[in-house]
Amino acid sequence: MGVKRREFLKNLGGAAGVTLAASVRSLGRARVLRVQANVPGAVGPDRLPIEWYKKKIQQVQAELEKRKLDALLLLSATNIIYNTGYFHLSTERPLAALIPKAGAPALFIPELEVDQVKLWWVKDYEAYFDFPGPVNRVRWIFERAARRLPKHARIGIEESTPPRLKEIKLGAPHAHPVVADDLIEQMRWVKDEDELAVMRRAMYFAEYGVQAGRDFVAQSGRVTEDQILKATADALADKMSKELRDVVGVGIEPPFGGLVPFGKRSAFPHAVPSKDRLSKGDALILSFGAQVGGYNVECERSFSVGAPSDYARKLYAAMLAAFDEGTRAMKEGAVAEDVDRQALEQIRKAGFERFLRHRTGHGIGLEGHESPWIAEGDKTVLREGMTFSCEPGVYDPGFGGFRHSDTVVVRKERGESLNHYPTRLADMVIEI
């Protein structure tokens, strides 16, 4: 075991260290990993407190004052969660939050949410029976919003498609709808330390997923991709169930929790699982995310199954140089597309430009992929507290691919990775 991996495991378990005792049991022909780890849960919250959301409402109201808006009406489930903390299952039934320029917010909900909403801090709500109903439900929502506002109110709206605008005008004929999609989107870009604490908590579980996948491969040998996914998801779900104190906004990525391509299929950035069997000499990518309290993080690591060839070392080195440069360059004042160019230039300089398939990264937070983008064409100036994936990859269809991904926070001098899992090739060899 390399020094960095030992340090990672020690940090994961705290000062007392960590003991990983993994066993494999049979379930039909599949082999299922049970990781028994003496690992105390990472210190941190499982969700944001109610006071955080009350403060966020005040911040939105200050922005409404600047824009001379009387209210903001949110129909995006993600934005409703961001502003009120009201987690719900988003379906075809519209659910909305009205934030007036002063006072408490109100929720407009389907009847099936009534008993649940009574448990939350937002006490002002109105409910309709179900969808589709005798009246278009977006129209129904704006009718009730208009009754709470001045007759000619300027109402900030989002996702203003022509059919939706038609219903808005029918529901609030005297109001002035103002497109304001960017208001919440740009507030979400910058995470405060409370949000980052939840993301660090999520990272603890994402990195456990990578470790569980690695251990399963080391113990089980020539497994298939879907076996790795199923075994790892089982171990991760058990751990989250045991250690989380609050399970609102918790998720494991499908299928079965991530992406685990190996061999030539590791050259497919978004490979779906197959029944191929792992072999010595394969490149292997273990790509796992976790969601805690609504916030997403990523941890992807590339491995060599057995000693890497000279060619594999060159591909890996090019990927790692781009990964390191991208992380370093995510600093305050940098331009998003410049960070992308600087990172991918490392792969081009190594002579592997033909094996580039995608950008360096994307915003991450309440959505796994969200703006801004560390990509050509995005001229956003980075601000401290923004969070991105850093995931440049190199993909040779004749051999396979390598890609790491960290979740990185923009800081003044350089990006700060929330990940602790090793990245150097010496630490990423799995013997089977």
Image (tube, rainbow, N blue to C red):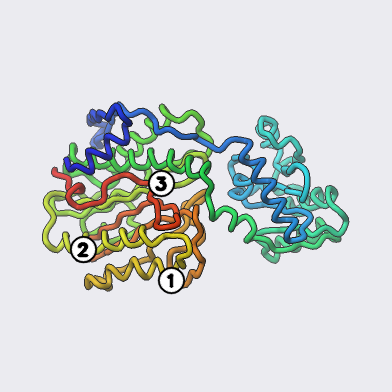
Image point 27% across, 29% down: which residue? 17
Q: Quadrant of residue 37?
A: top left
Q: Helix or strand or loop: what does disc 3 sit on?
A: loop
The one nearer the camera, 310 or 278, is 310
> Where residue 411 sits in the image (x, y, percent)?
44, 55
Q: Which mark, by number, is residue 315? A: 2
Q: Amino acid at mark 3?
A: Pro
Q: Helix or strand or loop: what does disc 2 sit on?
A: helix
The one nearer the camera, 301 or 116, is 301
Question: Viewer-nearest of labels 3 and 1?
Answer: 1
> Where residue 202 sits in the image (x, y, percent)?
43, 40
Q: Residues within 10 Å of mark 3 (few under 14, many from 20)?
A: few
Image point 70% across, 41% down: which residue? 110
Mark 3–mark 1 Cα distance, whole angstroms, equals: 28 Å
Residue under label 1, please give it. 376
Q: Amino acid at mark 1?
A: Glu
Of the image marks 2 and 1, the number of the one nearer the N terminus: 2
Taking 112 as reference, is 379 left or right?
left
Above or below, comparing residue 352 to residue 298 in the picture: below
Q: Which mark, by number, is residue 254? A: 3
Taking 121 as reference, is 262 left or right?
left
Taking 280 as reference, is 370 left or right?
right
Residue 301 visible within the image: yes
> Where residue 300 sits in the image (x, y, percent)?
32, 50
In the rendered view of the protein, which quadrant contains the C terminus? top left
